[in-house]
């Protein structure tokens, strides 16, 4: 907590309806954010129980400078992932970090299970356990609207909620945050569902004057200027991350049709420029961010005969266009938005959904599965049938869709097709077939995400492939991001927040840390994550890489399977030495 | 010699809104020389293609080549 020597943790027990608040001085050495959340997860996680057991915790945390400086806008959630069975870590923007900060909580730990569907109404002075039976079955959009009408605090409130997929415990169900933002990956929505927890409303309304305002404002202005007056962040606001489609497609790094191809013949129809010209209607920002990278696109839908149309708005970015676009062979920007919409309303991770459907499409073509199982014929480019399949996954319509709802690893365990089940340690791939950096980074990353260490970025910047340098770069970035995420900086702004800037920001609000402290914090957090992973039974040396990665050329050309496994072994060695220190 | 250059939408902010241009470079010039003439800062360049093939910036150009410049891949 700013200006206090402790981390304020709100513990909520859904079973008993009791809460407690602890001011934890011992957590300060983890700084905040992912550091504090990791430590709280380590204290409360139950390796002996299923990820969806009611006794498993959900941890939320904000950082030591959350909402006080530009682009420090995110909240971290940690949990045991039902998708991978191990470390679950996910980030979301919106208003949640600001409201937690102004409600006076650095972290929240939610355990137990409500007797009936419920939602939590959290304020500075109270936690309300409220009946959500009438909301059960509502889309994430509808329930957000209803709670907005029922709960006070508009303008100082964040509402996070699940859709039907979370209620049905789809293993990659998401949690929607204030519309258009999500805890997307690794199935936090299912953990909500396992607790009968439909939503959380947080109202933050305290006033917190800055003590040394002159110094603070100087640092604030410097950061604001870097964010707004330079090109560093401009791309994110302009056409946004969808500009990646064109270079990745030109260089052969765009996963297409379940990565049977690395180039999409209709790439220009779903490019960032196409979305900007044909669909973009609005840009939005998380609270406290002057960039505004949230792109809202619109498509027209006929809802009745006689030329009755409605305009439907959905958020889009690169990963969604990859997963529900090129990966499924979808040929137009309108159709990509048509697929994003049910994924959003049902409350699922778009990346996992797209990758799972890519596998199912190929498995169907190879006759590993039949139409009796898929209920509709799946083929690349068939938007209408994919919409039905998305609904079937969320509803766990039959045995086959129940398997799909548990991820591509599980589905391929049952039906075969492992070689083209595109996941890294059970987490469905991200949209970068860029080379060994991406493969290594996603495999060894603490949560098996491209966001753990930016492997795709290393692939792009490394002039000549060198195994040792690649392993060192991924290892260094993984540790550095542990530190960055203890502040919960939006990673889009990581080039703005270099070490000097971070120290200036923290020092201006009375948190006098050194460069060495930041290094130590990053290492402390990474070690804690690795301890959790080990306790959950994760063994890096037993991971399986889908052969498709080595059949389809990448951004950096053809990749070799033996080299990839060698890199994983090298990294594993590095980890063992790191943990022994 | 003269070569054709095209840039993606993002780069038009550096080229006065022009997406395609023909420029004069010295005989035996490398791709980097042509890119510099467009006004696009080199740090913004992810890679270039020449005649639809991804090449290094020291790739030597020939009369009539078509060079296209792409931005760096962005994300978290």
Image: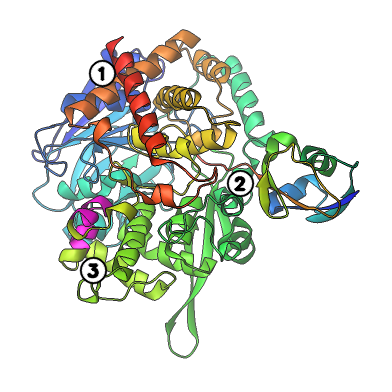
The reply, left or right, for residue B37 in relation to residue A315 is right
Marks 1 and 2, how far apart at CA: 39 Å
Whether marks 1 and 3 lie on the same chain: yes
Q: Is residue A163 visible from the viewing direction of this image?
A: yes
The residue under label 1 is A23
The residue under label 2 is A237
Q: Nearer the viewer, residue A550 or A447?
A: A550
Image quarter of the N terminus of chain A: top left
Marks 1 and 3, how far apart at CA: 54 Å
Q: Is residue A181 visible from the viewing direction of this image?
A: no
Q: Secondary structure at mark 1?
A: strand
Q: Position of residue A109 (x, y in %)?
A: 22, 32
Principal SS element in the magenta part?
helix
Q: Position of residue A232 (x, y in %)?
A: 64, 35
Which chain contains the residue that carries disc 3? A
| Residues in magenta, as a range | A401-413
Disc 2: CA contacts within 10 A as few (<14), some (14-19) or many (>=20): some
Q: How is the image coloured?
A: rainbow
Q: Secondary structure at mark 2?
A: helix
The reply, left or right, for residue A468 in relation to residue A229 is left
């Amino acid at each position: 907590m700013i200006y206090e020597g402790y981390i304020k943790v709100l513990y909520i027990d859904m079973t008993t309806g009791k809460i407690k608040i602890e001011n934890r001085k011992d957590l300060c050495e983890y700084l905040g954010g992912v550091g504090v959340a990791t430590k709280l997860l380590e204290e409360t996680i139950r390796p002996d129980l299923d990820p969806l057991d009611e006794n498993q915790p959900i941890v939320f945390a904000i950082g030591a400078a959350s909402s006080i400086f530009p682009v420090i806008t995110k909240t971290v959630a940690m949990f045991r992932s039902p998708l991978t069975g191990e470390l679950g870590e996910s980030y979301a923007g919106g208003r949640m970090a600001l409201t937690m900060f102004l409600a006076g909580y650095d972290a929240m730990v939610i355990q137990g299970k409500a007797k009936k569907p419920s939602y939590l109404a959290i304020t500075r002075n109270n936690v309300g356990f409220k009946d959500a039976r009438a909301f059960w079955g509502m889309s994430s959009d509808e329930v957000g609207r209803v709670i907005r009408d029922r709960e006070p605090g508009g303008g100082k409130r964040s509402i996070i909620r699940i859709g039907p997929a979370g209620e049905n415990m789809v293993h990659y169900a998401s949690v929607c945050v204030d519309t258009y933002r999500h805890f997307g990956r690794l199935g936090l929505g299912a953990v909500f569902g396992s607790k009968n927890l439909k939503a959380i409303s947080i109202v933050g309304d305290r006033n917190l004057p800055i003590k040394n305002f002159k110094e603070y404002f100087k640092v604030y202005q410097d950061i604001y200027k870097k964010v707004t007056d330079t090109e560093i962040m401009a791309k994110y606001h302009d056409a946004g991350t969808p500009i990646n489609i064109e270079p990745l497609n030109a260089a052969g790094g765009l996963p297409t049709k379940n990565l049977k191809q690395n180039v999409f013949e209709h790439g220009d129809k779903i490019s960032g420029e196409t979305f900007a010209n044909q669909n973009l209607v609005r840009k939005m920002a998380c609270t406290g961010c002057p960039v505004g990278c949230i792109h809202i696109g619109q498509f027209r839908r006929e809802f009745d005969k006689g030329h009755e149309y409605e305009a439907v708005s959905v958020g889009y970015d690169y990963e969604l266009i990859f997963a529900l676009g090129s990966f499924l062979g979808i040929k137009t920007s309108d159709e990509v938005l048509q697929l994003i919409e049910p994924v959003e309303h049902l409350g699922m991770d778009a990346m996992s959904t797209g990758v799972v459907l890519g596998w199912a499409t190929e498995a169907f073509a190879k006759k590993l599965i039949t139409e009796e199982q898929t209920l509709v014929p799946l083929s690349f480019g068939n938007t209408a049938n994919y919409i039905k399949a998305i609904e079937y996954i969320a509803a766990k319509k039959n045995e086959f869709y129940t398997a799909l709802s548990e991820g591509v690893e599980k589905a391929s365990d049952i039906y075969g097709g492992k070689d083209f089940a595109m996941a890294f340690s059970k987490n469905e791939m991200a949209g970068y077939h860029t080379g060994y950096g991406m493969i290594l980074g996603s495999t060894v990353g603490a949560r098996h995400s491209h966001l753990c260490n930016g492997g795709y970025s290393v692939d792009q910047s490394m002039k000549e492939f060198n195994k040792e340098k690649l392993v060192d770069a991924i290892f260094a970035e993984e540790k550095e991001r542990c530190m960055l995420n203890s502040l919960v900086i939006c990673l889009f702004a990581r080039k703005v927040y270099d070490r000097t800037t971070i120290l200036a920001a923290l020092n201006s609000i009375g948190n006098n840390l050194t460069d060495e402290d930041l290094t130590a914090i990053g290492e402390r957090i990474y070690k804690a994550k690795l301890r959790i992973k080990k306790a959950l039974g994760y063994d890096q040396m037993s991971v399986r890489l889908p052969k498709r990665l080595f059949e389809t050329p990448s951004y950096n050309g053809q990749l070799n399977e033996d080299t990839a496994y060698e890199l994983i072994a090298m990294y594993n060695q590095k980890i063992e030495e790191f943990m022994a220190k | 010699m003269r070569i054709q250059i095209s840039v993606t939408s993002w780069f038009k902010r550096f080229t006065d809104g022009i997406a395609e241009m023909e420029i004069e470079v010295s005989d035996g010039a490398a791709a980097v020389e042509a890119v510099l003439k467009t006004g696009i800062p080199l740090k913004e360049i992810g890679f270039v293609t020449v005649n639809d093939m991804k090449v290094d910036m020291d790739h030597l150009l020939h009369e009539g080549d078509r060079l296209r410049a792409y931005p760096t891949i962005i994300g978290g």
